[in-house]
Amino acid sequence: MTGLSDRELASLAWIGLIAVGVLVWRPLRPVAGSLRDLVRLFLSPVLVIPATLLGIYSAAVVALMSQTPAWTVDLLKDTAIWFLGVGVVLLFGATRAVDEPGWFRHRARELVGAVVVLEFYLNLHTLPLPLEFLLQGWAIVLILVAAAATLDRESAGMSTAAERLQVATGLALLAYVGLWLAGSWRTLDLAQTAREFALPIWLTLFAFPFLAVWSWFLVWDGARRQVAMFSPEGRASWRSHVAVVWGYGRQTSGLRRLANYWARRVAEAPSVQAKLAVIREHRAELRAREVETRKRAEDLARYAGVKGTDADSHQLDRREFAATRQALTWLATCQSGWYQRQPPVGRYKHDLLKIFQPGSTHGLPDEHGITMKVRRDGGAWYAWRRTITGWAFAVGAAGPPPEQWFYDGAEPPNGYPGSDPRWGHSPFEQGPNWED
């Protein structure tokens, strides 16, 4: 069995040092409590059981591969590191496979991506332990500086400097390993090196069937719980189990959406055949939604840059319409909450646009382009945005919630609702472009 490398020993030293710091240093005491909660979570049966099953499955795969030249006992350490680092992460990330089309395909591509090859190359030879310890400390500092700088737009220069230092450090490591490799090429065990490179690839590929079954089980279990909520006995009957498995099969998207109205109908249907009829109806509705969603996407591409309206007075070019409406509606919801709950009560907030942080702009660019105005006394407000097509949307209020005004047109409104006639005659009225 190959021992731990100096890089791995340095990583363990840093983990231990950080753990001691969290326990001893008073400012980090709250973090210690969070870590204890995290440890309890990872030791809970809901996580331990699937991880144990994956471990048993992976051990069976390794036992099979040990009968070939692909695995030897010298790879035991690397196998354990793969399981703790990659396998467990994949296990809990597989829950996204339902909502992320091509999740397994993307993970497979990552196996032979440049990052994996580069990481393997850098691990061919490590620095002496003291230098590895210092190097990892330096890397931690750069990562923390870059992360902190991203939270403050005024520190963008610091973030850029930290990223450049990371690149420089990586290039220095590449050169160091390259020089070592040039002088030690003849002494390198190519067969063992090839095994070490291939190990995480075939382990991950063999894990995919287990992860697919696991992700399906999680979705099925969620659907089962939804049906159980509406069952008179408080649990899903065997008829419901049979109908759900038979009716949806491997269609996890349908299982994922079995909730509320449809779960109630499945629970209340008297027989397996009746439950299957409900499920067929549900699947037909989902297919119709998919067709409609696909049509909208096609229309967005077809009518990009096309002026004019359709028979229902909808603008043909509707790019950014949905995201703009969603962002403005969310802003209106926040203004309503602020008016009713936050002191001073009865005033809309002047600086509420700060709720739109990078990455949380409801599908709009980080530079969202929303303009908001609040009357000096806080009793009225409105916000507007011009989409990429040139069409403008706006929301606002001239009185207390739940009053809400909606507007869309070629130009944004010029004043608050009630003072600018372009808002219309009464609140809550929505033009055709506020519809999907």
Image (spheres, helix red, strand yellow):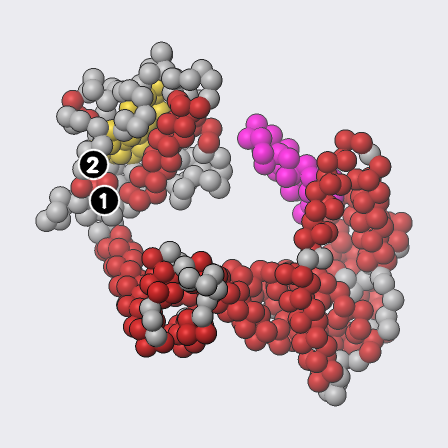
Task: Name the residue beneath numbered marker 2.
Answer: 430
Residue 235 location (% of width, % of height): 48, 64
Which is nearer the eye, 229 or 292?
A: 229
Q: Which residues are magenta?
A: 140-167
Along the horizontal axis of the image, is 43 left or right of 76? left
Task: Name the residue beneath numbered marker 1.
Answer: 435
Crowding near the residue tagged with mark 2, few <14, some 14–19, many ≥20 C-alpha atoms within 10 Å: some
Residue type at mark 1: give it: Glu
Q: Which of the 4 image quadrants contains residue 432? A: top left
Helix, strand or loop for disc 2 = loop
Q: Image point 88% across, 53% down: which residue?
A: 129
Residue 405 location (% of width, % of height): 25, 29
Is 166 contained in the magenta span? yes
Residue 337 location (% of width, % of height): 41, 28
> Does any portion of residue 265 appear in the rendered image?
yes
Above or below — where is 418 with respect to 162? above
Res 291 label: none
The residues tagged by marks 1 and 2 sit, at their Cα atoms, a distance apart of 8 Å
> Does any portion of residue 104 appear in the rendered image?
no
Q: Label the magenta part by its dominant secondary structure.
A: helix
Which is nearer the eye, 236 or 426?
A: 236
Q: Quick check: marks 1 and 2 in contact, CB under 8 Å? A: yes
Along the horizontal axis of the image, is 223 left or right of 145? left
Q: Image point 82% across, 40% down: which residue?
A: 23
Q: Which residue lies most toward the bottom here?
A: 67
Crowding near the residue tagged with mark 1, few <14, some 14–19, many ≥20 C-alpha atoms within 10 Å: few
Residue 54 location (% of width, % of height): 66, 71
Helix, strand or loop for disc 1 = loop
Residue type at mark 2: give it: Gln
Q: Which residue lies most toward the top here?
A: 377
